[in-house]
Image (cartoon, rainbow, N blue to C red):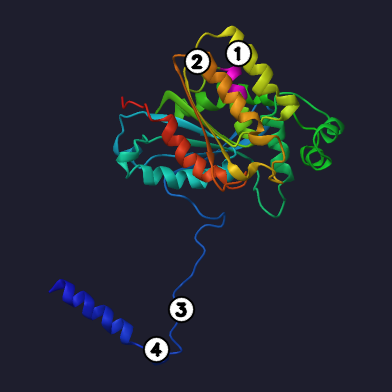
Amino acid sequence: MAMCGFVAFNAALCSERAEDAPSDRPLPLFKKVHPDGVVLDTTERRRITSRFVRDTYQIWVDLPWSYKARPGKRFPLIVLLDAPILFSAAEGMHKVFANAPDEKVPDCVVVGVAPDFSVDANIGLIPFMQERGRDYTATHMSEEEIAKKYSKSLASMLGGRTGGAPRFTQFLKLELIPLIEREYRVTSDRAIVGYSASAGYGCYVLFKEPGLFRRFVLLSPWLEWDDYLVARKLQKEFFERHSDLTANIYICTGSREIGDPLNPNEEGRNEAAFVERFKARHYPSLKIDRRVFDDESHATVWMVGYSHGIRAVFSDFVEE
């Protein structure tokens, strides 16, 4: 009977023709509820000024749905760089993963690192790109050097503000992570996620601070900086000093990145050789995987890469 009633109700709705509806029917209220834009459930926004970088960041925190329901539990921590690009998509994915136990992705506290200004058309992307260039490059290059080695457009975009990766690492290690550990129930099982330049930084911190993160999702990493400094020199130095590496690493790229105007570098930006050199070491505690996604470009691969990558690096996760 209930189903019959439902069908009849819908039939009655469908039978009402548009011309039969009153033309003066008032529209419902359509009120702006938050002047700063959409507010995502279970998220918080904080601000921190780093004494190492001497700049201020916004920190966007997404708590899993189970955070309040399980007050005695601690959760893995995901540090998400390039938050203006990645955070909203990651937040949605983790909400879906929470209801998909077959995917075996644990509930995590996701912490996005963002500049302390809006990344929008009002100010353009230049300030955002300059901050990325400062924080995610390992060595300093002048604007003239960048123009000569890469392009005038990249030089103009970065403005010579480069070489801040060591200071940014101190910010993560000595300021952000301790504050997150103080304010939220997180474990020492930490992942870092980056895209393009920030994925290149993920490779840098892997070599310079092994143990700070255990899991690495590196989405189309830009490794070309300073003659592939990270992918060649720092990797070689690491091999000379370490007989093992406890890490789960996932690297992805798109098949259309060859000749991609957004990323006109060597095929795969030397990612394949970077991964193969790791595999040749036969580190017993290392898991590393690289995937090339068909029909994806540098601009599009990050979303599908995040979904696959976060599942890959947590595939061996054991609930405490």
Asked whether disc 1 touches disc 2, contact meaning CB atoms under 8 Å apart, the reply is yes
Determine the residue positioned at 38% across, 30% down.
Answer: 315
| Residue designated by label 3 | 27
Local packing at callout 2 (Cα closer than 10 Å; few below 14, some 14-19, many 20+) is many
Three-letter residue code for mark 1: Phe
Local packing at callout 3 (Cα closer than 10 Å; few below 14, some 14-19, many 20+) is few
**Magenta run includes residue 187:** no
- Disc number lying in front (3 or 4): 4
- Disc number lying in front (1 or 4): 1
Task: Say whether residue 245 is visible.
Answer: yes
Q: Is mark 3 on a helix, strand or loop?
A: loop
Label disc, if present, on residue 245 of the rendered structure: 2
| Residue range highlighted in magenta | 204-209
- Disc number lying in front (2 or 4): 2
- Disc number lying in front (1 or 3): 1
| Residue designated by label 4 | 21
Q: What element carries label 1?
A: helix
Three-letter residue code for mark 4: Ala
Q: Which of marks 1 and 3 is nearer the N terminus?
A: 3
Task: Say whether residue 52 is visible.
Answer: no
| Residue designated by label 1 | 238
Query: In the rendered view, does 3 fall on the left or right side of 69?
Result: left
| Quarter that holds the C terminus | top left
Q: Which of marks 2 and 4 is nearer the N terminus?
A: 4
Q: Which of marks 3 and 4 is nearer the N terminus?
A: 4
Q: Which of marks 1 and 4 is nearer the N terminus?
A: 4
Distance from Cα at disc 3 to Cα at disc 2:
62 Å
Q: Position of residue 122 (x, y in %)?
A: 71, 54
Three-letter residue code for mark 2: Leu
Distance from Cα at disc 1 to Cα at disc 4:
73 Å
